[in-house]
Image (cartoon, grey):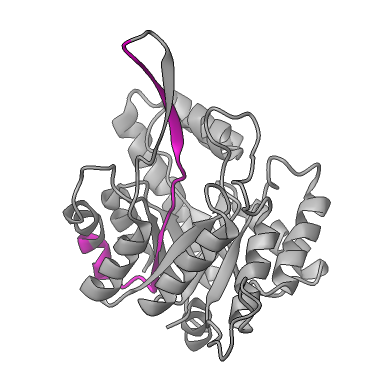
Amino acid sequence: MKVTEHLSKNIDKTLFSVEILPPLKGKSIRSIYDILDPIMEFKPAFVDVTYHREEYVYKKRENGLLEKFSIRKRPGTVSICAAILNHYNVDPVPHIICGGFSKEETENALIELSYLGIDNLLLLRGDAIKSESAFEPHYGGHKFALDLVQQVSNMNRGVYLDEELQEVTPSDFCFGVAGYPEKHFEAPNLKTDLRYLKMKVDAGAQFIVTQMFFDNKKYFEFVEKCKENGINVPIIPGLKPVTTKKQTTVLPKIFHVDLPEDLADAIDKCKNDKEVKELGIEWCTNQSIELKKAGVPCLHYYTMGNAETTCRIAKKVF
């Protein structure tokens, strides 16, 4: 079932969904089941699976020179999605990114997903390689998420890269894009960010999943600004509890989000990470309850490989 169908069939209900990471290379699918098994108690409508692009490492050769190698530390997004669909009969939502792929490689991946019966996607530009200061597209690939949106929209209309194909079958993907209540860190301002978001929706995006936030006011304001700009697709809030003191600096640095003063002050008073974890779960639970009362379409939790905190929150909310 498509994400939009889940939402429309439960219009008077707030759904529950999660995002998981592929395991590090060398781990088995069992590590995914260990995360998802307890989460299944709360009947997630869908499960997002992230995609992680290549990284570059340098290894010293016998002659002393350094050789550059490309590695992927968390492969397996497509096969994990197939396993989730087969094992749990829950709809997976693979992340499709611009970075690391040519347009043809993207098209081939989409065809494989279609063959597997996976018809939901989250389309993202993706981050720059760690060794690069700014995002650089793969040779023959997309530079912007909007370009990726347009490619999938074309496939849904039966338009493939090879214009000479005949009697093609259009794909039938339901796809969403990311939204940033505190704006994308590369956008000069929120107004500009919303203009590009509107372009993605106009090009075919059917839902939006937000970056994590810790102040519900920012989500509500973001939704209102979206409506003012003609963006009327479902906007799913993304949530994550703070679980360690270190995250008070790591989360703002990596995800470009603010922690409210009350939350930051309370964390600062915690004696250890155990206390921070309890505080973070309580804060996220209160966020969830308020959002659910406001009638949001779905609450989407970034598990970061930790099922316990998500389950404890879900038990109090759903």
Q: Quadrant of the C terminus?
A: bottom left
Closest to the observer, 243 or 251: 251
Image quarter of residue 277: top left
Which residue does the image show at 53% across and 88% down from the upper left?
169
Say whether residue 295 is visible.
no
Closest to the observer, 73 or 293: 73
Which residue does the image show at 69% across and 64% down from the upper left?
223
Residue that lies at the very extreme toward the top in this rendered image: 64
Closest to the observer, 103 or 193: 103
Give left or right: position of 88 versus 301: left
Query: Picture coordinates of residue 241 (x, y %)?
Result: 42, 45
Which residue does the image show at 65% across and 57% down from the upper left?
145
Say whether residue 90 is visible.
yes
Say whether residue 40 is magenta.
Answer: yes
Query: Picture coordinates of residue 104 (x, y %)?
Result: 55, 62
Magenta span covers which residues? 37-62
Q: Quadrant of the N terminus?
A: bottom left
Give left or right: position of 286 versus 140: left
Q: Name above or below for residue 40 compared with residue 144.
A: below
Closest to the observer, 177 or 9: 177
Q: Name above or below for residue 272 compared with residue 290.
A: above
Image quarter of residue 164: bottom right
